[in-house]
Image: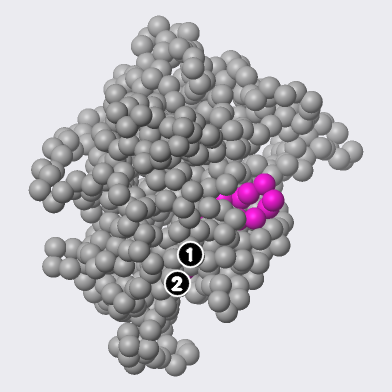
Amino acid sequence: MRVVPHLRRMRLTDANLATSSIIVFPLGVPTSVRSLTRVVMTWTAHLGARASLRGAPAAHLARGHRRTRDTPPRRRSAPPPRAETARGEHAIDVPLPTSGALAPPAWARDAVSAWPWRGGLEPCGDHPVRALSPDQVTGSIPEDLRGALFRVGPGRCRVGDAKYAHWFDGDGATFACSFEDATRDEADSSVTVRAGIKFVRTSRFAAQERAGVDKGVAVRGAWTQADERNFPFANLFRFPTNPSNTAPLVHAGELLALCEGGAPVRVDKRTLDTLDTLDNETKSVFAESAGRRLPMGFSAHAKRDSDGSLYTWGLAAPPSIGVQVARISATGEVTHVVDLPLCAGDLNGALSPERLEFALIHDCAMSEKHLVFVVPPWRLRPGFDGKLAGALAGATSFGHAFEWDDRRGAWLVVLRKNDLSVVAARETKQASAYHFCGARDEARRAPDASSETSSSETSSSETSSSDASSSETCVVLVGELRGRRDDLEARFADMYASVWAEDGYNTLREYVIDVNSGALLSDAPFATPVSRASDAERARGRVAGQLPMEFPTAAPATRGRAPRFVYTLAFSGSGGGYFDAIQKLEAGAETHATRFLPPGVFPSEVEFVPKVCAEKDEDAGYLLYLEYDSAAHASSVVVLDARDIAGAELARIHLPFHVPYTFHGTFEPE
Ligand SMILES: [Fe+2]
């Protein structure tokens, strides 16, 4: 095995500092100016230091199949449908508020009237955590289910009449629902259920509150431009702000709201009050040292290892440049920070336009020994044909300046966890993925050169370069997009106008990667992909294949090995226009248990909580998830038996408010 030494840390040299170091401002200048300085320094460093990079050549790691610039672009698919409306039993009158601060403007009311699932985008405001009455719980909460479910998502996608220009720009809110043994004073029930939701008090949220919700968007987001009519020059020299809206993480006893747009934000586990004082500068809760600064962004999918350590990544903090990966110990000390190569030039030091690009890396996969990144060719490019200059100048947002490059494949990187060294990095098949569902290390017989990839559906033509009779592989479960990334982003950019179909969702695939070469040996589906469920399958609660999916999750006990079961949100094509089912995919099975939700009811990602018992079955546990019921404009927490997801629910907590669709969650046992 050949392991590339640590890539040279890309630091500002004296020469390129000559340009950037003249931009020095005293403390106390406006954040926007400091942000501009940071952007300019970063980009100056990006241009200068990358040009002067003298890393050891590692071309042997970048021999992957590569499309040429002459390859004709893939035919663009049809744009997402936008004019349809829900019909029949899905045409539900959503009881949105008609007065008060939460009453929607006419365009939002019309959008929800057309497609009731969009009621789940509407803001709900703060609801302090409080105990619910026993009659708000139906069924029976299992005795071994004690702890708290935390969920984080955009608590609002609009401020007053102004829509955010992307779902991921919505202001973050943290939801909690806890189950505790009742005290003697609460003798009318054996369990006390508390629930609430609160916005994360980020600097951008505070700025909007100061400006008022009727003044347009006050602060620039990653995709959303601030309203220049009320705030002249609101985007000029402004850096995107952190909405803190993607995932909760409990680390060293602290509840953190995560988003790759900025640093983690501490939230009180009991009250959901924001604990940090924020000015959008890095106020890390982790112990950095002079040589080990965390990246500016903190991944919403930071990976927690079995020893309690965390792996995160993001845009490097100046004076470093590019994307970096960091390791944080269980006690919170930053122990490693390395550069992540994102193109062949990063490995061999060759000058290439790709070295000046920005990439979005939402998730990665972690096995016992490796971290695996699959970075789609969705890039922000500089130069005359790129849009970076306009984004820097405030003419367009940074997020909307990203573009899909039809001429390139995804970029695959394998890091060794113990020292974050680069094991393999190369271009691979063209693919886009937001989420992964774990990885495992396996020794496999190396295929013959003629066997190439095993999947008939793959577009890859790679072969393993290993001559050994067996090879070390990493098997990664990847949620690979069925349609086009730009069409998906167009839906995200206007959720109140989007209509979802199969091409907006994914197929869960098993990528088998030769760790020595980075070659993709196969990419077979975890279960046969199907487009929709038949009426007979709906009646049976089982589907002969995996439906279009997102948010795959498996039992924590399967970490590092092949899961038998993977739980996903699914799109069955029932006519609701959004997720309408939950699937329990079973490896090797012909049919898969599927829970079809009633018309007008829409789920959030499911959380698998293992049973506290001696049972060893992989599916001995509970599925917890939020349901939005558009007919009531209210949400519930639902508890299912993971062994029988299509059967009767075990318990339902009827919340006295609706929860805007959340992205990710975690369950903290008592
Ligand atoms: Fe995510």
For the point 35% across and 64% down, the residue is 57
Identify the residue position indicated by label 2 in the image: 9
Residue 154 shows in the view: no
Q: Magenta stretch: residue 629 in it?
A: no
The front one of 124 and 172 is 172
Main secondary structure found in the magenta portion: loop
In front of the other: label 2 or label 1? Answer: 1
- Say above or below: 129 vs 110: below
| 482 sits to left or right of 665 | left
Mark 2 Cβ and ligand 1 under 8 Å apart:
no
Relative to 356, 58 lies left or right: right
Q: Quadrant of the C terminus?
A: top right
- Seen at 48% across and 55% down, the residue is 3
- Residue 408 in view of the camera: yes
The residues colored magenta run 296-310
- Give the Cα separation between the discs numbered 2 and 1: 8 Å
Residue plotted at (53% across, 34% down): 443
Q: Residue furthest right?
A: 184
Tell me the residue that label 1 is attached to: 6
Residue at the spot x=61%, y=61% of the render?
328
Residue 640 placed where, x, y %? 62, 25
Is 650 located above or below residue 339 in the figure? above
Asked which quadrant contains residue 535, the reply is top left
Amino acid identity at mark 2: Arg
Q: Is residue 37 left or right of residue 560?
A: left
Q: Residues within 10 Å of mark 1 (few under 14, many from 20)?
A: some
Q: Is residue 361 above or below residue 487?
A: below
Q: Is residue 302 magenta?
A: yes
Q: Residue type at mark 1: give it.
A: His
